Amino acid sequence: MRMKTDVYDRTKDTQELVFPGTQLAVTEEFLGGSGTYSTDRFIFASVIGNVVIDVEKHEISVVPKPKSAVIPKNGDIFVGSVVNASRQMVTVAIYFINNSEINPTFTLVIHVSQVSKEYLETVDEGIRFGDIIRGKIIDAKTIPLQGSLIGSQLGVVLASCSICGGKLDKIGRDRLKCVQCNQTERRKTTIDYGTSHLQFKL
Ligand SMILES: [Zn+2]
């Protein structure tokens, strides 16, 4: 069996990571197994994955790379945005868990008692619709998940003005001021509010 040596045409190695459409081998030398498709002359990968060569059967296949399935756990740190807010609770769409982007997203709720160590009568004293927040999952067993913003690294990381939509700058502990209309608002902010560091040091 003559192996091609050209970097583009060569037969792919076992365990090599390939993408759909990558040429794997020529049909005179191999049979295409699962995760491949063939033309008259060539065998191509049809999935993202690792090459497996069965020497005895002269078969080349691609084993799909498993998607990183994230199962939320208690204590995980999430980043998300507030998609709904009532007096006592906000609903959050989660985009990152422990710094890994997740897809599809999870939905999480935060009760007013979990927004701040301090007593808040209503949720909007600490967090509002549209805010980008970093929080912790405190109950991963329920649907939706339950979260908390209590902790100095947790809270609102970015917010916009409720009046004009302008950027809110931090002017004091949990106090923000709109750069456009001077409206001041309260949020339970993270210690790094406004730095756009959505990621979290684990
Ligand atoms: Zn404003």
Image: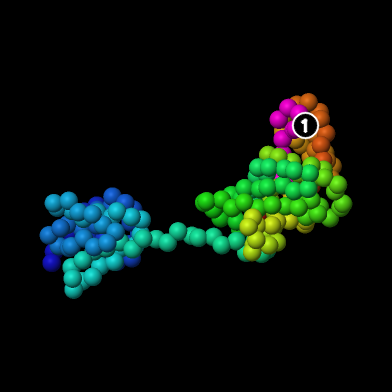
For image coordinates 75% across by 48% down, the residue present is 89
What is the magenta segment's predominant secondary structure? loop
Residue at the spot of label 1: 178
Q: Is residue 159 magenta?
A: yes
Whether 169 is drawn above or below 57: the answer is above
- Magenta span covers which residues? 156-165
For image coordinates 79% across by 51% down, the residue present is 112
Percent from the top left, x then y, of residue 37? 23, 54
Q: In the picture provided, is 161 more to the left or to the right than 198?
A: right
Residue 36, quarter of the rendered image: bottom left
Q: Is residue 52 magenta?
A: no
Could you say which is closer to the camera, residue 79 or residue 137?
Answer: 137
Could you say which is closer to the camera, residue 59 or residue 124?
Answer: 124
Q: Amino acid at mark 1?
A: Cys
Ligand 1 within 8 Å of disc 1? The answer is yes
For image coordinates 86% across by 47% down, the residue present is 121
